[in-house]
Image: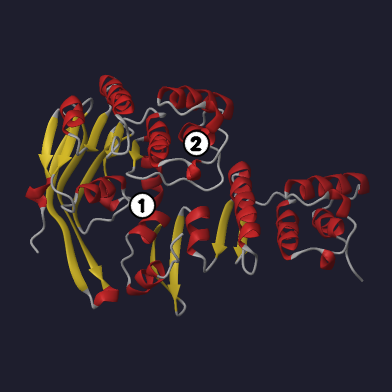
Amino acid sequence: MAVSAGANVGERLMAVGWNHYGRIRDTASSWLQRVEIDTARIDDAPRTYSGGMRQRLQIARNLVTEPRLVFMDEPTGGLDVSVQARLLDLVRGLVNELGLAAIVVTHDLAVARLLSHRVMVMKAGRVIETGLTDQVLDDPREPYTQLLVSSILPP
Amino acid sequence: MTAMIEIKNAEKTFTMHLQGGVTLPVVSGVSFKVNAGECVVLAGPSGVGKSSILKMIFGNYRCDRGRIGIRHQGALLDLALAEPREVLSVRRDTIGYVTQFLRAVPRVPTIDVVAEPLHAVGVSRDEARQQAANLLRRVNIPERLWSLPPSTFSGGEQQRVNIARGFISDHPILLLDEPTASLDAKNREIVVELIAAKKRAGVAIVAIVHDDEVRQAIADRIVDVTTFAAAA
């Protein structure tokens, strides 16, 4: 059974007690708009969506219940650069607008620089360096951090 | 006279682990004060550590030893020992920094890049954009460019956007790294006027300026950074 995109978003609302179908559908639709998914596709199955659209649907599904804290695991992994850019702009805008707290896992240092205030560098299961993002990326102290920073492709 | 910045014996060394652990001393024994309404110019040859000192004052470079005293919300805070959130609070409310080259979040229109520091302290988007527009006009960035992201602008235009962004807030401390380097004579004049206005408003300024004329016009005191050159 394929759950439609709109239903994916609606299910979260139902899980927190919403039961008015019209309101659920309207809220789902407005969130699809917010993440720039054509609302005409609200009843399509997500498997008919592109990778970027599926990521944006996931964002809508996670934010529709207005959480205070969001975890994002490699939010831009596997997406082409223009799609990555749009997604990052969207996430940055939403985090600002909604005052969200977010923990993001990424191996893309450009994503870290764009999205985060603070960074924790991990190696072999341990946090080896932590600080403000600009501190860690401009003044890396640990050998592994220096290796990471020196490996970034120049623009 | 209120000391807005009090640096005592600050020291920084880079250890390059990828190059066999070679150490690169940057500065040591850095000590100086800057009062409200005063402009201190850091002088010295290229590579001596002037920009590094500004970065240490901003908390971008962590220092290995010493004290970076910043007057923040009425009290002197040691930035070298401050928690990350305190540093963020200092950057939001107290220290403005005009870097040598503009670093802006991509795809954001120029007017919003400039308005952002005001918006971050609670000014409404519209009011912040109004003030941004006034400042952009002052530094001769034409209105047809305001809706474009600054990444495609010329070096001089980018620097003027950078200056507008740095000067828009009421930060009591301003750090300026070569603010007039890419500018023509007319725009250099304008920046010198903006700096003079900030001094009159009681802002403490630390600046790096190579141009002699601009230096004469803005400096109350020169600090020779070669005296802080770390022993090799």
Quadrant housing residue B193: top left
**Which residue lies at the image location 40% right of the left edge and 44% below the top edge?**
B102
- Mark 1 belongs to which subunit? B
Q: Position of residue B222 (x, y in %)?
A: 12, 35
Which amino acid does the dot numbered 2 rest on? Glu
Which class describes the residues within 10 Å of circle 1: few (<14), some (14-19), or many (20+)?
Answer: few
**Which residue lies at the image location 49% right of the left edge and 27% below the top edge?**
B142
**Which residue lies at the image location 41% right of the left edge and 29% below the top edge?**
B169
Give SS at disc 2. Answer: helix
- Give the mark nearer the N terminus: 2 vs 1: 1
Give SS at disc 1. Answer: loop
Confirm whether residue B133 shows in the render.
yes
Q: Position of residue B174 (x, y in %)?
A: 30, 34
Q: Position of residue B148 (x, y in %)?
A: 56, 38
Instruction: Answer above or below: position of B86 versus B197.
Output: below
Given residues B18 and A64, the one toward you in this image is: B18
Which class describes the residues within 10 Å of circle 2: few (<14), some (14-19), or many (20+)?
Answer: many
Residue marked by disc 1? B83
If the image is split into quadrants, where does the C terminus of chain B sit? Answer: bottom left
If the image is split into quadrants, where does the N terminus of chain B sit? Answer: top left
- Residue A135 shows which numbered tag? none
Image position of A30 (left or right of B150)? right
Confirm whether residue A69 shows in the render.
no
**Outermost residue, bottom direction?**
A124
Residue marked by disc 2? B116
Q: Nearer the viewer, mark 2 or mark 1?
A: 2
Callout 2 and callout 1 share a chain: yes
Which amino acid does the dot numbered 1 rest on? Glu
Quadrant housing residue A62: bottom right
Q: Position of residue B48 (x, y in %)?
A: 15, 52
Image position of A117 (left or right of B76)? right
